[in-house]
Image (spheres, rainbow, N blue to C red):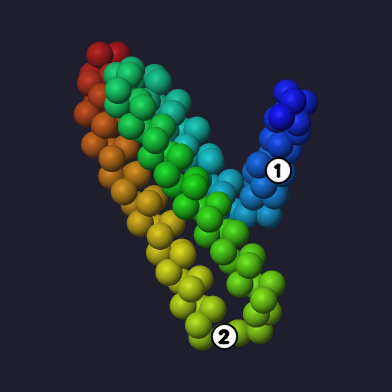
């Protein structure tokens, strides 16, 4: 595979990110919180290893959100009218996103909050 072909393959995930950004409020919300979290972690000088944990958790949430969105699109394509089984599938996928977001939030708070108070006290 040539370099040009490899670079060309990046258009598909780029298109997926663009679609998620343009069409999914939840994705934009998670990205905004991710950027705010990273900025706060940088300002309060979170250590390198803990910063990697924060970045991994952000990735975890965004992956869950993207998979949830893809699953919802697939369900809507093949069953445009209300169906209790489709509703159950969508609810389970949504619960997966919520679980990842809650986990990431708790980990972020455990890492950042003590450093935030130390940072504020040092001003």
Measured in 3D between alpha carbons, the distance from the residue under mark 2 to the one under mark 1, in whole angstroms, is: 31 Å
Structural crowding at the residue carrying mark 2, measured as other residues with C-alpha within 10 Å and reported as few (<14), some (14–19) or many (≥20) = few
**Is 53 in front, or is 107?**
53
In-image side of 118 versus 46 (left or right) = left
- Which one is in front, 10 or 91? 10
Q: Position of residue 57 (x, y in %)?
A: 38, 39
Q: Residue at x 69, y 35 (%)?
A: 10
x and y, in percent, of residue 61 in the image = 44, 47
Relative to the observer, which residue lies in front, 46 or 15? 15
User: Residue 12 — which label?
Assistant: 1
Q: Secondary structure at mark 2?
A: loop
Image quadrant occupied by the C terminus = top left
Measured along the vertical axis of the image, is residue 41 above or below residue 101?
above
Relative side of 40 to 70, left or right: left
Q: Secondary structure at mark 1?
A: helix
Q: Residue at x 70, y 50 (%)?
A: 19
Q: Residue furthest front?
A: 1
- Can residue 44 be seen here? yes
Task: Name the residue tied to disc 2.
Answer: 83
Residue 120 visible to an observer of this rendering: no
- The location of residue 25, given as percent across then percent down, is 60, 54
Task: Name the side, left or right, on which 12 lies relative to 45.
Answer: right
């Amino acid at each position: 595979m040539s370099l040009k072909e490899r670079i060309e393959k990046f258009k598909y995930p780029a298109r997926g990110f663009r679609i998620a950004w343009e069409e999914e409020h939840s994705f934009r919300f998670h990205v905004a919180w991710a950027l705010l979290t990273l900025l706060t972690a940088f300002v309060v000088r979170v250590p390198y290893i803990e910063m990697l944990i924060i970045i991994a958790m952000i990735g975890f949430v965004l992956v869950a959100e993207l998979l949830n969105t893809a699953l919802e699109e697939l369900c809507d394509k093949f069953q445009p009218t209300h169906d209790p089984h489709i509703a159950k599938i969508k609810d389970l996928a949504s619960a997966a996103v919520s679980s990842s977001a809650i986990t990431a939030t708790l980990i972020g708070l455990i890492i950042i909050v003590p450093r935030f108070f130390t940072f504020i006290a040092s001003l």
